Image (cartoon, rainbow, N blue to C red):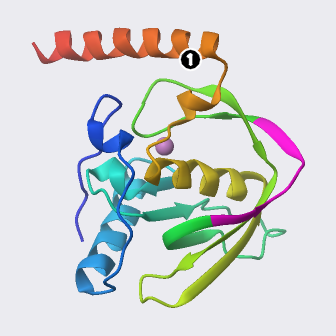
Amino acid sequence: MAIREIVYLGDPVLRAEAEDVTVFDDDLRVLVRDMFETMYHADGIGLAAPQIGVSTRVIVVDLRRQDEDEPEPQRVAVVNPVVTWASKEVAKQTEGCLSIPGLEEVVQRPVAVTVAGQDPDGNELVVEADDLFARALQHEIDHVDGILFVDRVSPLKRRMLLKKWKKIEAEAAAEAG
Ligand code: NI
């Protein structure tokens, strides 16, 4: 297992339509393990392969909830994930992204979704999720389509976010000397 480097907004891999996974081999299982490890290390609740520079359709989510009243596991790796159903009901909640650290904004999404795909061994997988679990899955599936949460806010808010990101980037560059 290894912690991989997370890429940031501005890297073209985050804007690419990621490739379907067709081979379910040890390389894929290593990728998935590394994605979980990288996500835990960064203290995130979700990660998509493009975020570590790998343009394939793989996502991981782990809410790491300790709730007694949340008995269903909310930890999953989905290969070739597709939203097959989304609730008409929507909700607004603040989102951030490991690839855009320092920025967050309220994003509207369906409250519940059904996601289909495969597990890392190639078995068919269907995940029914609501609330934060559904939100995290939708955010990560966006990533494999090259979509970021800053694309899901109003044009005005998007301009403000991108302006703030430029400032964060400039500060980081100045620190790096
Ligand atoms: Ni993200």
- At x 56%, y 29%, the residue is 151
- In this image, 55 relative to 81: left or right? left
Stretch of the chain drawn in magenta: 83-92
Query: Which residue does the image show at 54% across and 67% down from the upper left?
Result: 81
Q: Position of residue 83 (x, y in %)?
A: 66, 63
- Name the residue located 34 percent from the left edge and 86 percent from the top edge: 24
Query: Which image quarter holds the N terminus?
Result: bottom left
Judging depth in this view, the residue of 133 and 141 nearest the camera is: 141
Q: Residue furthest right?
A: 89
Q: Is residue 126 above or below residue 131?
A: below
Label 1 Cα crowd, 10 Å radius (few <14 / some 14-19 / many 20+):
some
Q: Is residue 45 visible?
A: no
Q: Is residue 157 above or below residue 52?
A: above
Name the image quarter holding residue 73.
bottom right
- Horizontally, residue 63 falls left or right of residue 67, namely left
Residue that appears at 42% across and 30% down: 101
| Beta carbon of the mark 1 residue lies under 8 A of ligand 1 | no
Residue 111 location, x and y as percent? 82, 51
On whether residue 81 falls in the magenta region, the answer is no
Q: Is residue 90 magenta?
A: yes
- Residue 163: x, y in percent? 44, 8
For mark 1, give the secondary structure. Answer: helix
Residue identified by numbered label 1: 158
**Overall secondary structure of the magenta stretch?**
strand
Is 22 drawn above or below residue 34 in the view shown? below
Residue 80 visible? The answer is: yes
The number of callouts visible is 1
Give the percent coordinates (x, y) of residue 96: 55, 35
Amino acid at dot 1: Arg
In this view, the residue in front, 118 or 96, is 118
Residue 128: image quadrant is bottom right
Q: In the picture, which quadrant includes the C terminus?
A: top left
